[in-house]
Image (cartoon, grey):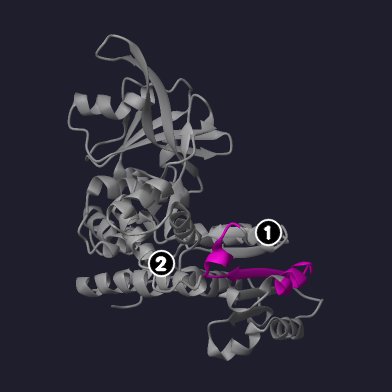
Protein backbone atom coordinates (compact mmCIF):
# COMPACT_ATOMS: atom_id res chain seq x y z
CA UNK A 1 0.00 0.00 0.00
CA UNK A 2 1.19 3.52 -0.80
CA UNK A 3 2.20 5.62 2.15
CA UNK A 4 -0.79 7.40 3.68
CA UNK A 5 -0.65 11.08 4.54
CA UNK A 6 -2.83 11.72 7.58
CA UNK A 7 -2.91 15.48 8.15
CA UNK A 8 -3.66 15.58 11.90
CA UNK A 9 -4.47 19.30 11.67
CA UNK A 10 -6.00 19.25 15.15
CA UNK A 11 -2.58 18.67 16.73
CA UNK A 12 -0.70 20.83 14.23
CA UNK A 13 -2.91 23.78 15.20
CA UNK A 14 -2.16 23.12 18.86
CA UNK A 15 1.56 23.37 18.16
CA UNK A 16 1.10 26.48 16.03
CA UNK A 17 -0.89 28.21 18.76
CA UNK A 18 1.95 27.53 21.24
CA UNK A 19 4.79 28.86 19.11
CA UNK A 20 7.10 31.33 20.88
CA UNK A 21 5.20 31.10 24.18
CA UNK A 22 8.39 30.75 26.23
CA UNK A 23 7.59 27.18 27.28
CA UNK A 24 8.91 23.74 26.37
CA UNK A 25 6.30 22.09 24.16
CA UNK A 26 6.04 18.49 25.35
CA UNK A 27 4.36 16.13 22.86
CA UNK A 28 3.11 13.13 24.84
CA UNK A 29 1.02 10.05 24.17
CA UNK A 30 1.16 6.29 23.84
CA UNK A 31 4.04 4.93 21.78
CA UNK A 32 3.39 4.59 18.03
CA UNK A 33 0.46 7.01 18.01
CA UNK A 34 2.19 9.47 15.66
CA UNK A 35 4.05 11.90 17.94
CA UNK A 36 7.34 11.76 16.02
CA UNK A 37 5.62 12.09 12.64
CA UNK A 38 3.65 15.07 13.92
CA UNK A 39 6.79 16.88 15.04
CA UNK A 40 9.39 15.87 12.45
CA UNK A 41 7.19 15.80 9.36
CA UNK A 42 3.95 17.74 9.76
CA UNK A 43 5.20 20.53 12.03
CA UNK A 44 8.59 20.68 10.32
CA UNK A 45 6.92 21.19 6.93
CA UNK A 46 4.74 23.90 8.45
CA UNK A 47 7.80 25.79 9.68
CA UNK A 48 9.31 25.62 6.19
CA UNK A 49 6.02 26.79 4.64
CA UNK A 50 5.98 29.97 6.74
CA UNK A 51 9.52 30.89 5.72
CA UNK A 52 11.69 29.40 8.46
CA UNK A 53 15.07 28.50 6.90
CA UNK A 54 15.96 24.80 7.21
CA UNK A 55 19.28 25.66 8.85
CA UNK A 56 17.38 27.37 11.70
CA UNK A 57 15.57 24.14 12.59
CA UNK A 58 17.65 21.79 14.74
CA UNK A 59 16.32 18.22 14.67
CA UNK A 60 17.67 15.50 16.97
CA UNK A 61 16.37 11.92 17.15
CA UNK A 62 17.83 10.34 20.28
CA UNK A 63 16.79 6.86 19.13
CA UNK A 64 18.93 7.22 15.99
CA UNK A 65 22.51 5.91 16.18
CA UNK A 66 23.63 9.11 14.48
CA UNK A 67 22.82 10.98 17.69
CA UNK A 68 23.65 8.33 20.28
CA UNK A 69 26.53 10.42 21.67
CA UNK A 70 24.00 13.15 22.51
CA UNK A 71 22.34 10.95 25.11
CA UNK A 72 24.89 12.42 27.49
CA UNK A 73 23.48 15.64 28.90
CA UNK A 74 26.67 17.67 28.53
CA UNK A 75 27.18 16.44 24.98
CA UNK A 76 23.61 17.41 24.12
CA UNK A 77 24.03 20.80 25.78
CA UNK A 78 27.28 21.56 23.95
CA UNK A 79 25.88 20.38 20.60
CA UNK A 80 22.83 22.66 20.82
CA UNK A 81 24.95 25.53 22.11
CA UNK A 82 27.31 25.18 19.16
CA UNK A 83 24.45 25.30 16.64
CA UNK A 84 22.74 28.51 17.77
CA UNK A 85 23.60 32.17 18.11
CA UNK A 86 21.82 35.09 19.73
CA UNK A 87 20.92 37.02 16.62
CA UNK A 88 18.16 34.93 15.03
CA UNK A 89 15.16 32.73 15.86
CA UNK A 90 15.88 29.02 16.26
CA UNK A 91 13.62 25.98 16.53
CA UNK A 92 14.73 22.91 18.47
CA UNK A 93 12.94 19.61 17.81
CA UNK A 94 14.06 16.58 19.86
CA UNK A 95 12.57 13.10 19.59
CA UNK A 96 12.65 10.59 22.46
CA UNK A 97 14.21 13.09 24.85
CA UNK A 98 14.05 10.65 27.76
CA UNK A 99 17.04 8.81 26.26
CA UNK A 100 19.20 11.62 27.64
CA UNK A 101 19.65 11.27 31.40
CA UNK A 102 18.83 14.53 33.22
CA UNK A 103 17.49 16.05 30.01
CA UNK A 104 15.46 18.50 32.13
CA UNK A 105 18.63 20.42 33.00
CA UNK A 106 19.54 20.79 29.34
CA UNK A 107 16.12 22.04 28.24
CA UNK A 108 15.60 24.44 31.11
CA UNK A 109 18.99 25.97 30.28
CA UNK A 110 17.85 26.85 26.76
CA UNK A 111 14.22 27.74 27.37
CA UNK A 112 15.38 30.89 29.14
CA UNK A 113 16.63 32.24 25.81
CA UNK A 114 14.11 34.38 23.93
CA UNK A 115 15.22 33.25 20.47
CA UNK A 116 14.87 29.46 20.79
CA UNK A 117 11.53 27.66 20.56
CA UNK A 118 11.67 24.11 21.99
CA UNK A 119 9.58 21.05 21.09
CA UNK A 120 10.22 17.53 22.42
CA UNK A 121 8.60 14.10 22.39
CA UNK A 122 9.12 11.18 24.74
CA UNK A 123 7.89 7.68 25.37
CA UNK A 124 8.31 6.41 28.88
CA UNK A 125 6.13 6.44 31.96
CA UNK A 126 8.27 8.95 33.83
CA UNK A 127 8.38 11.36 30.92
CA UNK A 128 4.73 10.90 30.05
CA UNK A 129 3.41 11.19 33.58
CA UNK A 130 1.80 14.27 35.07
CA UNK A 131 5.12 15.00 36.81
CA UNK A 132 6.62 16.28 33.56
CA UNK A 133 5.51 19.85 34.29
CA UNK A 134 7.24 19.66 37.67
CA UNK A 135 10.37 18.30 36.00
CA UNK A 136 10.49 21.41 33.83
CA UNK A 137 9.87 23.68 36.82
CA UNK A 138 6.67 25.12 35.45
CA UNK A 139 8.08 25.65 31.97
CA UNK A 140 6.38 22.71 30.25
CA UNK A 141 3.34 22.91 27.96
CA UNK A 142 1.85 19.50 27.20
CA UNK A 143 0.24 18.52 23.89
CA UNK A 144 -1.17 15.03 24.25
CA UNK A 145 -1.48 13.02 21.05
CA UNK A 146 -3.93 10.12 20.78
CA UNK A 147 -4.31 7.34 18.22
CA UNK A 148 -6.40 8.42 15.24
CA UNK A 149 -9.83 9.77 16.04
CA UNK A 150 -12.67 8.36 13.96
CA UNK A 151 -12.77 11.50 11.82
CA UNK A 152 -9.03 11.21 11.12
CA UNK A 153 -9.48 7.52 10.36
CA UNK A 154 -12.35 8.22 7.92
CA UNK A 155 -10.35 10.96 6.18
CA UNK A 156 -8.04 8.33 4.63
CA UNK A 157 -10.29 5.27 4.68
CA UNK A 158 -11.23 3.66 1.38
CA UNK A 159 -14.92 2.91 1.88
CA UNK A 160 -18.14 4.30 3.37
CA UNK A 161 -18.53 5.48 6.94
CA UNK A 162 -20.23 2.33 8.22
CA UNK A 163 -17.51 0.08 6.85
CA UNK A 164 -14.99 2.47 8.39
CA UNK A 165 -16.73 2.10 11.75
CA UNK A 166 -16.47 -1.68 11.62
CA UNK A 167 -12.73 -1.51 10.97
CA UNK A 168 -12.23 1.25 13.53
CA UNK A 169 -13.89 -0.51 16.45
CA UNK A 170 -12.20 -3.78 15.45
CA UNK A 171 -8.62 -2.66 14.64
CA UNK A 172 -8.52 0.74 16.35
CA UNK A 173 -6.72 3.89 15.27
CA UNK A 174 -2.97 3.26 15.55
CA UNK A 175 -1.72 5.02 12.39
CA UNK A 176 0.44 2.17 11.08
CA UNK A 177 -2.49 -0.25 11.10
CA UNK A 178 -4.07 1.71 8.24
CA UNK A 179 -1.07 0.90 6.06
CA UNK A 180 -1.45 -2.87 6.56
CA UNK A 181 -3.78 -4.65 4.14
CA UNK A 182 -3.88 -8.22 5.47
CA UNK A 183 -6.24 -8.56 8.49
CA UNK A 184 -3.99 -11.21 10.04
CA UNK A 185 -1.04 -8.84 9.83
CA UNK A 186 -3.07 -6.08 11.47
CA UNK A 187 -3.92 -8.35 14.40
CA UNK A 188 -0.32 -9.56 14.67
CA UNK A 189 0.99 -5.97 14.69
CA UNK A 190 -1.39 -4.94 17.48
CA UNK A 191 -0.79 -8.04 19.61
CA UNK A 192 2.98 -7.76 19.24
CA UNK A 193 2.96 -4.10 20.21
CA UNK A 194 0.84 -4.74 23.25
CA UNK A 195 3.15 -7.52 24.43
CA UNK A 196 6.59 -6.50 23.19
CA UNK A 197 6.42 -2.70 23.20
CA UNK A 198 4.06 -1.42 25.88
CA UNK A 199 4.27 -4.19 28.46
CA UNK A 200 7.96 -4.79 27.82
CA UNK A 201 8.67 -1.10 28.36
CA UNK A 202 6.96 -1.23 31.76
CA UNK A 203 8.66 -4.47 32.79
CA UNK A 204 12.13 -3.19 31.89
CA UNK A 205 11.65 0.26 33.35
CA UNK A 206 10.41 -0.99 36.70
CA UNK A 207 12.62 -4.10 36.77
CA UNK A 208 9.72 -6.54 37.09
CA UNK A 209 10.90 -10.14 36.87
CA UNK A 210 8.80 -13.25 36.54
CA UNK A 211 5.55 -11.50 37.44
CA UNK A 212 2.47 -12.65 35.50
CA UNK A 213 0.05 -10.57 37.58
CA UNK A 214 0.53 -7.41 35.52
CA UNK A 215 -0.19 -9.20 32.26
CA UNK A 216 -3.27 -10.87 33.72
CA UNK A 217 -4.44 -7.54 35.15
CA UNK A 218 -4.33 -5.97 31.70
CA UNK A 219 -6.51 -8.83 30.45
CA UNK A 220 -9.00 -8.23 33.27
CA UNK A 221 -9.19 -4.50 32.55
CA UNK A 222 -9.57 -5.28 28.84
CA UNK A 223 -12.54 -7.51 29.63
CA UNK A 224 -14.19 -4.87 31.80
CA UNK A 225 -13.93 -1.58 29.91
CA UNK A 226 -16.42 0.87 31.33
CA UNK A 227 -17.06 -1.24 34.45
CA UNK A 228 -16.46 -0.09 38.01
CA UNK A 229 -13.23 -1.43 39.49
CA UNK A 230 -10.83 -0.68 42.30
CA UNK A 231 -7.55 -2.30 43.38
CA UNK A 232 -9.13 -4.09 46.35
CA UNK A 233 -11.88 -5.63 44.22
CA UNK A 234 -9.36 -6.67 41.58
CA UNK A 235 -7.00 -8.18 44.17
CA UNK A 236 -9.88 -10.24 45.55
CA UNK A 237 -10.69 -11.44 42.04
CA UNK A 238 -7.12 -12.64 41.64
CA UNK A 239 -7.15 -14.40 45.02
CA UNK A 240 -10.40 -16.19 44.14
CA UNK A 241 -8.54 -17.69 41.20
CA UNK A 242 -5.60 -18.75 43.34
CA UNK A 243 -3.29 -15.93 42.24
CA UNK A 244 -1.46 -14.38 45.17
CA UNK A 245 -1.30 -10.59 45.00
CA UNK A 246 -2.47 -7.57 46.97
CA UNK A 247 -4.16 -4.19 46.60
CA UNK A 248 -0.88 -2.26 46.67
CA UNK A 249 0.58 -4.26 43.78
CA UNK A 250 -2.59 -3.95 41.71
CA UNK A 251 -2.71 -0.19 42.32
CA UNK A 252 0.93 0.18 41.27
CA UNK A 253 0.39 -1.76 38.03
CA UNK A 254 -2.67 0.32 37.18
CA UNK A 255 -0.55 3.45 37.66
CA UNK A 256 2.02 2.01 35.24
CA UNK A 257 -0.71 1.49 32.63
CA UNK A 258 -2.02 5.02 33.19
CA UNK A 259 1.42 6.62 32.93
CA UNK A 260 2.09 4.76 29.68
CA UNK A 261 -1.30 5.90 28.31
CA UNK A 262 -2.49 2.36 27.68
CA UNK A 263 -5.62 3.14 29.70
CA UNK A 264 -7.41 6.19 31.11
CA UNK A 265 -9.30 6.52 34.38
CA UNK A 266 -12.71 8.14 34.84
CA UNK A 267 -13.68 9.24 38.34
CA UNK A 268 -17.24 9.24 39.70
CA UNK A 269 -18.84 12.62 40.30
CA UNK A 270 -21.92 13.29 42.45
CA UNK A 271 -23.74 15.84 40.31
CA UNK A 272 -26.12 17.11 43.01
CA UNK A 273 -23.51 17.06 45.78
CA UNK A 274 -20.89 18.55 43.44
CA UNK A 275 -18.14 16.32 44.74
CA UNK A 276 -16.07 13.31 43.74
CA UNK A 277 -17.03 10.03 45.35
CA UNK A 278 -13.71 8.22 44.91
CA UNK A 279 -13.12 4.51 44.36
CA UNK A 280 -14.22 2.54 42.42
CA UNK A 281 -13.31 4.00 39.04
CA UNK A 282 -13.93 3.19 35.40
CA UNK A 283 -11.03 2.36 33.08
CA UNK A 284 -11.05 2.81 29.32
CA UNK A 285 -8.50 1.82 26.68
CA UNK A 286 -6.76 4.47 24.61
CA UNK A 287 -7.14 2.29 21.50
CA UNK A 288 -9.70 -0.39 20.71
CA UNK A 289 -7.36 -2.33 18.44
CA UNK A 290 -4.85 -2.82 21.25
CA UNK A 291 -7.63 -3.82 23.64
CA UNK A 292 -9.22 -6.24 21.18
CA UNK A 293 -5.89 -7.83 20.26
CA UNK A 294 -5.11 -8.29 23.93
CA UNK A 295 -8.26 -10.44 24.23
CA UNK A 296 -7.64 -12.26 20.93
CA UNK A 297 -10.81 -10.61 19.60
CA UNK A 298 -12.97 -12.71 21.90
CA UNK A 299 -15.11 -9.92 23.40
CA UNK A 300 -16.42 -7.51 20.79
CA UNK A 301 -19.57 -6.14 22.43
CA UNK A 302 -20.28 -3.06 20.33
CA UNK A 303 -22.14 -1.35 23.18
CA UNK A 304 -19.06 -1.20 25.40
CA UNK A 305 -16.68 -0.46 22.53
CA UNK A 306 -18.87 2.43 21.36
CA UNK A 307 -18.88 3.85 24.90
CA UNK A 308 -15.07 3.63 25.05
CA UNK A 309 -14.69 5.35 21.66
CA UNK A 310 -17.01 8.19 22.71
CA UNK A 311 -14.99 8.60 25.90
CA UNK A 312 -11.74 8.82 23.89
CA UNK A 313 -13.28 11.32 21.49
CA UNK A 314 -14.24 13.59 24.39
CA UNK A 315 -10.69 13.43 25.76
CA UNK A 316 -9.27 14.25 22.33
CA UNK A 317 -11.49 17.33 22.18
CA UNK A 318 -9.99 18.50 25.46
CA UNK A 319 -12.79 17.80 27.90
CA UNK A 320 -12.26 16.62 31.45
CA UNK A 321 -14.49 13.54 31.57
CA UNK A 322 -16.05 11.95 34.65
CA UNK A 323 -18.77 9.38 35.31
CA UNK A 324 -21.84 11.12 36.73
CA UNK A 325 -24.11 9.98 39.55
CA UNK A 326 -27.58 11.45 40.08
CA UNK A 327 -29.43 11.09 43.37
CA UNK A 328 -33.08 10.07 43.12
CA UNK A 329 -35.67 8.98 45.69
CA UNK A 330 -38.17 6.32 44.67
CA UNK A 331 -40.58 3.93 46.33
CA UNK A 332 -39.48 0.41 47.16
CA UNK A 333 -41.74 -2.65 47.38
CA UNK A 334 -42.80 -1.62 50.90
CA UNK A 335 -43.94 1.79 49.71
CA UNK A 336 -41.08 3.60 51.43
CA UNK A 337 -38.93 6.14 49.65
CA UNK A 338 -35.30 5.08 49.30
CA UNK A 339 -32.33 6.87 47.80
CA UNK A 340 -30.95 5.50 44.57
CA UNK A 341 -28.08 6.66 42.37
CA UNK A 342 -28.55 6.77 38.62
CA UNK A 343 -25.52 6.85 36.35
CA UNK A 344 -24.69 9.34 33.62
CA UNK A 345 -22.12 7.84 31.26
CA UNK A 346 -20.08 11.04 30.93
CA UNK A 347 -19.93 14.43 32.59
CA UNK A 348 -17.78 16.62 30.35
CA UNK A 349 -16.31 19.88 31.58
CA UNK A 350 -14.35 22.61 29.89
CA UNK A 351 -14.03 25.99 31.56
CA UNK A 352 -17.45 26.95 32.88
CA UNK A 353 -19.31 24.78 30.39
CA UNK A 354 -20.60 21.26 30.97
CA UNK A 355 -22.35 18.53 28.98
CA UNK A 356 -24.08 15.36 30.19
CA UNK A 357 -23.79 12.49 27.70
CA UNK A 358 -25.32 9.03 27.44
CA UNK A 359 -24.10 6.39 24.99
CA UNK A 360 -26.77 4.08 23.52
CA UNK A 361 -26.22 1.58 20.73
CA UNK A 362 -29.90 1.68 19.82
CA UNK A 363 -33.17 3.21 21.04
CA UNK A 364 -35.84 1.11 19.31
CA UNK A 365 -38.84 2.13 21.45
CA UNK A 366 -40.19 4.48 24.12
CA UNK A 367 -39.27 2.11 26.93
CA UNK A 368 -35.62 2.19 25.91
CA UNK A 369 -35.75 5.97 25.58
CA UNK A 370 -37.12 6.26 29.12
CA UNK A 371 -34.30 4.05 30.36
CA UNK A 372 -31.59 6.05 28.62
CA UNK A 373 -32.88 9.47 29.65
CA UNK A 374 -33.84 8.53 33.22
CA UNK A 375 -30.67 9.87 34.79
CA UNK A 376 -30.57 12.96 32.57
CA UNK A 377 -34.07 14.15 33.39
CA UNK A 378 -33.24 13.95 37.11
CA UNK A 379 -30.45 16.52 36.79
CA UNK A 380 -31.78 19.87 38.00
CA UNK A 381 -29.37 22.23 36.26
CA UNK A 382 -29.49 23.73 32.79
CA UNK A 383 -26.38 22.29 31.17
CA UNK A 384 -26.91 20.49 27.87
CA UNK A 385 -28.00 16.85 27.94
CA UNK A 386 -27.19 14.55 25.02
CA UNK A 387 -27.81 10.96 23.99
CA UNK A 388 -25.47 9.58 21.30
CA UNK A 389 -27.09 6.68 19.46
CA UNK A 390 -25.90 4.51 16.57
CA UNK A 391 -29.41 4.39 15.06
CA UNK A 392 -29.62 5.97 11.61
CA UNK A 393 -31.50 9.12 12.64
CA UNK A 394 -31.39 12.83 12.05
CA UNK A 395 -30.46 15.05 14.95
CA UNK A 396 -33.42 16.20 17.06
CA UNK A 397 -34.41 17.41 20.53
CA UNK A 398 -37.04 15.28 22.26
CA UNK A 399 -39.87 16.51 24.47
CA UNK A 400 -37.54 16.57 27.49
CA UNK A 401 -35.15 18.93 25.73
CA UNK A 402 -32.48 16.24 25.30
CA UNK A 403 -30.42 16.28 22.12
CA UNK A 404 -30.50 12.93 20.31
CA UNK A 405 -27.61 12.66 17.86
CA UNK A 406 -26.39 9.91 15.57
CA UNK A 407 -22.99 8.44 16.47
CA UNK A 408 -21.37 9.37 13.16
CA UNK A 409 -22.70 12.94 13.28
CA UNK A 410 -21.21 13.18 16.76
CA UNK A 411 -17.79 11.73 15.87
CA UNK A 412 -17.31 13.47 12.52
CA UNK A 413 -18.23 17.00 13.64
CA UNK A 414 -15.83 18.65 16.09
CA UNK A 415 -18.64 21.01 17.14
CA UNK A 416 -21.29 18.32 17.53
CA UNK A 417 -21.92 19.00 21.22
CA UNK A 418 -23.08 22.51 20.39
CA UNK A 419 -25.54 21.61 17.62
**Distance in Å between CA atoms under marks 1 and 2:** 33 Å
Rendering quarter of residue 385: top left
- Residue 398, given in percent of the width and then of the height, sits at 31, 24
Outermost residue on the left side: it is 364
Location of the C terminus by quadrant is top left
The answer, for residue 219, to whether it is visible in the render is yes
- Give the residue displayed 26% in from the left and 54% down from the top: 165
Q: Is residue 127 magenta?
A: yes
198 and 146: which one is in front? 198
Q: Nearer the viewer, mark 1 or mark 2?
A: 1
Residue denoted by label 2: 6
User: Which residue has dot 1 on it?
Assistant: 134
Q: Is residue 99 left or right of residue 212?
A: right
Sooner in the amino-acid sequence: mark 1 or mark 2: 2
Q: Which residues are magenta?
A: 105-130
Q: Check whether the beta carbons of the residues at disc 1 and disc 2 lie within 8 A of each other.
A: no
Residue 352 placed where, x, y %?
58, 34
Answer yes or no: is residue 172 visible: no
Q: Secondary structure at mark 2?
A: loop
Amino acid sequence: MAKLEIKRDFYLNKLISRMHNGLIKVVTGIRRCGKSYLLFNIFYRYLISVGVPKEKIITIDLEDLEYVALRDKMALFEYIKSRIDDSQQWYLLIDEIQNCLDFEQVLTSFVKKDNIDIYVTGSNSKFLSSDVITEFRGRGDIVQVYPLSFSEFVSVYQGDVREAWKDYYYYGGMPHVLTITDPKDKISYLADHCNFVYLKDIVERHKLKGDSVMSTLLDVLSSNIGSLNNPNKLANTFKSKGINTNEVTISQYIDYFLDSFIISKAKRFDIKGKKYIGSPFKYYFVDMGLRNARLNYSQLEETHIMENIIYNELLIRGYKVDVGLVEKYQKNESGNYVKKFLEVDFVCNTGNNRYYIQSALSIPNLEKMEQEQNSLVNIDDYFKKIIVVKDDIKLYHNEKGILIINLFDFLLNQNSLDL
